[in-house]
Structures are given as C-alpha cells and as structure tokens.
Amino acid sequence: MTIWDLLLKLGIKLPEHLHTSINSGNKSLSNSPTYNINNYGVMIVQKGEPVLEAGYVKIPINMLNTDQQKILQGFLVDEHKNGVPILEEGFLDAVNGFKSGNIEKNTVVAVFKELSPKYIPPEDLEIIKASVLLKNNFDKGSKIAWTKRKIVMDYGERGRNICNLYSAGYFENLILPIYNELKDVSNGLARFSLLYQDIVEHYPFALFIHQWMGVEEVESQIKTKLEEMEKYGIAVLNIHGIGKGNKKTIRKAIVSISQDDKYSKLEFCTTELKEIIVVQISKE
C-alpha cells in the first residue's frame, strides 16, 4: 500500500490547493508543480489538518476512528520495513536535543555507554537513548504512543521491554543500583550483565499494558506474572498503564482477579496520577 492509497483508504483529503498539484505515484494531477507523495514520510500528529510539510505527510489522529487507526498501524508496520520515515509530532525537536549532546548527560546513558558492547548489546544503548527521548517528551505533556511504536518496529520486543522499564523508572531505581553494587566486585560486571539480561527479557516484577490488549488478555498475563513471582521469589508485582483506555482495562482485570478465591491472600493497591495507573499486587 502506498501513502497515496493509505490516504484514500482513511478517507483523508489534503487541502484543496494540494489536490491540484500532487503526483499520486500513478498519474500527475497537474503539470506544475508536482509532489510525488509516495516519496514522503509519515508524521503522526494529535490534531489539526492533514498537510505536506518538510518531506512528511502529517496525519492527525483526532480525524481517525479506532478502525482507521488500526489501518494506519498496519501500514506503518509494513512500510517501516521498506524504509518509509515515520515520526511523531515533537520527536524532531527531541532528536535535535539528542544530536546536540544533551542526552549524553543522562546518567543511565553514560553508564551503559561504558558497558557497551562488552557487557550489553550495542543496540540496547540505542534503545535506551530513544527511551530517554520518549520519556522526556511524555514528561513535557506530549503524546508518545506512536513514537513508542516506532521503537518497537525498530527493535522488536526487546525495544518494547527496555522502553517500558526505562519509562517506569526501573533503570534508575533497580538496574543502576545493581550496577553500582557490582561494578567494583570481582567479576561483578559479568554478573551484572547476566542479571540485566534476565530483567530485560523477563522482568517478573512488572507488567506493562498497551492499548491493543483486552481485559481477558490482561487478566491472563497478570496471572502468568503472579506464577513467575513464586519462581523468582518476588513479593510485589507492579502493573503499569498509560491512558484512559488502559486504566479502564486494568481496573476491570484487577476486579476480576481480586474476586477469584485463588488470589484471596493477595493485596491490591492502586495509584492513579492523571493518565498513569500503577497497581501493586503483593503477598499479605
């Protein structure tokens, strides 16, 4: 599917003056000037009008219903593999901050720069840098859902895991303290590497909910994590979610699990701040 086909499928109409000067990739709609829209990237914006700007087709999310957003998501996954540039509004500014060297001052980035590539995969450092940018944008009040999807498309499930862990504060509050405790111990960095890999691949102490998950899937994953708690000897499980839809899904799943006699001895503590929800499940 080309970008032109995508716009037609979403029912998005570009401004009238552009309709008279766009080359759809199939035929020129005017003699001059022409824009080959299929050479453009895609920039996801939260609201406004669809426009062509700086080499990107801006697509406002507020114009799309749930089904249209799924069509867009499928397009982004497929076309990303073909090298189509995909960005979220505000991400270019963050990237400029990254290029200026600001991100190198981040403590986590500095530590993992020293550890790469001997003790951590080099792509993990890039994922961490992208995660820092993502969290900075979120802390400023920017929407980050589509940018996070870009990280997942670039780095797969490992990208999602590291991004989730960084956003929830586990790098600063868990991983760095482990590093500081082991860095000066004999064979400590090798031991840290093993622990780090286990945390990134399994993180049995946490579950991160995304918007495509239904209540039944969330329930199932929580129960799986509760079983892992026993295996790893962990006393507390944290459920994380961002956004109204995720908060609602988590609440419903927690109500269902708390009413199950099998989990009657667990304690559930819910904290909500604006769009963020964290449910802590612990043994009595």
Image (cartoon, rainbow, N blue to C red):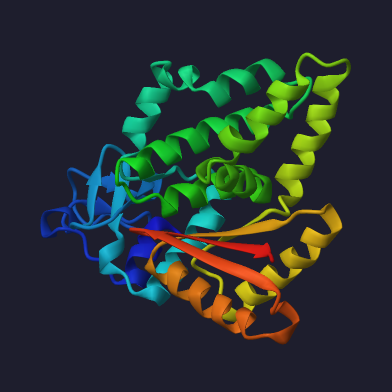
Q: Residue furthest right?
A: 187
Whole-percent x, y for residue 120 in the image: 74, 28
69 or 4: nearer the viewer: 69
Whole-percent x, y for residue 53 in the image: 24, 42
Note whether residue 269 is visible: yes
Residue displayed at 44% across by 34% down: 133
**Depicted 216 relative to depicted 227: above or below:** below
Q: Is residue 65 left or right of residue 84?
A: left
Q: Picture quarter containing residue 277?
A: bottom left
Residue displayed at 29% across by 72% down: 11
Whole-percent x, y for residue 155 in the image: 63, 43
Residue displayed at 56% across by 24% down: 109
182 or 284: nearer the viewer: 284
**Depicted 37 relative to depicted 210: above or below:** above
Q: Residue furthest left?
A: 17
Q: Picture quarter containing residue 207?
A: bottom right
Q: Is residue 149 left or right of residue 220?
A: left
Q: Picture quarter containing residue 281?
A: bottom right
Whole-percent x, y for residue 263 in the image: 71, 77
221 or 31: nearer the viewer: 221
130 or 42: nearer the viewer: 130
Residue displayed at 36% across by 24% down: 97
Note whether residue 40 is visible: no
Q: How many marks?
A: 0
Query: Which quadrant is the C terminus positioned in?
Result: bottom right
